[in-house]
Amino acid sequence: MFKNLIFDWSGTLVDDLGPTLEATNAVLQLHGKDTMNKEEFRRRFRLPYSEFYEEVLPGILLGELENHFRHAFANSTVPVTVLPHAREKLDWCQNNNVRCFVLTSMDQKTFEAQLDDLFMRQFFEATYSGVLDKRHVIGELIDTHNLLIDETAFVGDMIHDVVTAKHGGVSSVAVLTGYTHHDVLLTVSPDWIVDDLSVFQAMMHDAKQMRSYE
Ligand SMILES: [Mg+2]
């Protein structure tokens, strides 16, 4: 099965929906807009986030919004946590020589801090953060690390992740632990949709067992 996995970060390996919603609402309030509840946010938020902000706060400079968002995110008291099964999945990959990478839109400073705070850095061969449009980077990631397309999957929780996988020619695995609902993810036809990373781990483990019997 897969020898290389590229992971999205938010909603795939870590749960940061709480502080992200809080920070988004702080930005909306600052500009006199109504706040969103969690369900509305999950319905409307999308990547690249520049498109989301153009929809909810048209005409405001992205850099200004990013600054306010990052300030509010950093000051949020809601913790960011590792999602259930994520650490076990990454452990399994490490023990089975599956190379792991991260490709995330999260700004580099916040991402690097989380990588250390959550003791996740040792799992990854390389990480790419602060990527507004992941389609622009996945090809470079694949080339730089000599990944074979057929042996590589991109794992993420949003439409943009599935679209990015297809753009890069790799398999797409959508997880339901993050920001996007099942029916919404179905519209872009990922190769797999899994409830969480334990299901994906079982898939890879079973495939490996099958190979060893061949
Ligand atoms: Mg995500």
Image (cartoon, grey):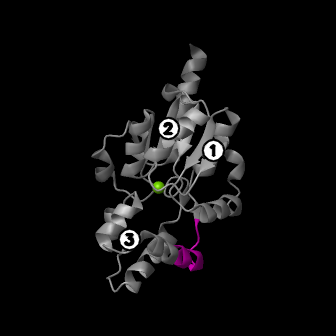
Which residue is located at x 42 percent, y 43 percent? Answer: 164
Q: What residue type is labelled 2?
A: Gly
**Which labelled disc corresponds to residue 139?**
2
Return the disc, 1 or 3, that comes first in the chain's sequence.
3
Relative side of 60 to 1, left or right = left
Q: Around disc 3, counting alpha carbons within 10 Å, would you say few (fewer than 14), some (14 to 19), or many (20 or more)?
A: few
Q: Position of residue 89 (x, y in %)?
A: 60, 44
Stretch of the chain drawn in magenta:
70-80
Front disc: 2 or 1: 2
Q: Name the residue under label 1.
A: 90
Mark 2 or mark 1, earlier in chain:
1
Pick out the residue farthest to the top: 214
x then y, percent, for residue 113: 67, 64
Amino acid of disc 1: Leu
Assign a secondary structure to mark 1: helix
Mark yes or no: residue 194 visible.
Answer: no
Q: Does the magenta stretch include residue 74?
A: yes
Where in the figure is residue 183, as x and y percent of width and height?
Answer: 28, 51
- Tag 3 near tag 2, CB within 8 Å: no
Q: Marks 3 and 2, Cα distance to the nearest angstrom? A: 33 Å
